[in-house]
Image: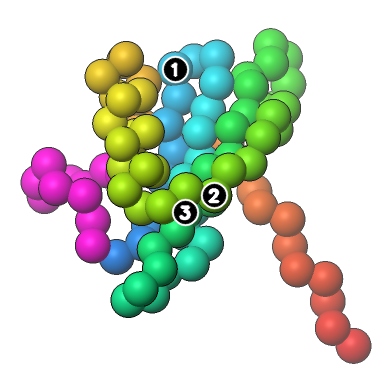
Amino acid sequence: MPNSSSNRPPLSPKEAWISDGRQVLHFRPSRWDRWSQRLEVTVGELLPGQPVPLLKKRLELSREAALKLWSEKRKLGWQPTTPQWQPPQAPARD
């Protein structure tokens, strides 16, 4: 995912968004410890006249697979973008 100081990926987990103008991918750390580094990748489709993309699927990838996917999309012209939706809030506890 993006790193402003160099071309190396970040060592700590970060959220990131990337889009080609038709689809958007949201990368979010789901498990991050010394032995297991996994990211959740949510795929959404941008629809004309709709404020929020249609969520199509959700994947859980290793850090390496997520970095590879990000790199492949960048080579195809996808650009980092601003957040396209808000994650659901956890239910309030009584």
Give the image location of residue 3, x and y in percent: 21, 47
What is the crowding at mark 1: few (fewer than 14 residues within 10 Å), some, or many (at least 20)?
Answer: some
Q: Which residue is mark 2?
A: 60
2 or 1: tag closer to the N-terminus? 1
Q: Is residue 49 left or right of residue 24?
A: right
Report the coloring of the rendering: rainbow
Give the image location of residue 5, x and y in percent: 11, 50
Give the image location of residue 69, x and y in percent: 37, 33
- Looking at numbered disc 1 in the image, what kind of residue is underneath it? Asp
Q: Which residues lie in the magenta part?
A: 1-11
Does residue 83 appear in the picture of this structure?
no
**Label 2 – label 1 distance at C-alpha:** 21 Å
**Label 1 – label 3 distance at C-alpha:** 20 Å
Q: Furthest residue to the left?
A: 6
Q: Which residue is mark 3?
A: 39
Q: Furthest residue to the right?
A: 94
Residue at the image point whose x is 58% and y is 43% from the top: 59
Q: Which residue is mark 1?
A: 20
Residue at the image point whose x is 62% and y is 29% from the top: 44
Find residue 78 and report its image quarter.
top left
Q: Would residue 9 be counted in the magenta stretch? A: yes
Residue 70 or residue 47, whichever sits in front: 70
- The mark found on residue 54 in the picture is none
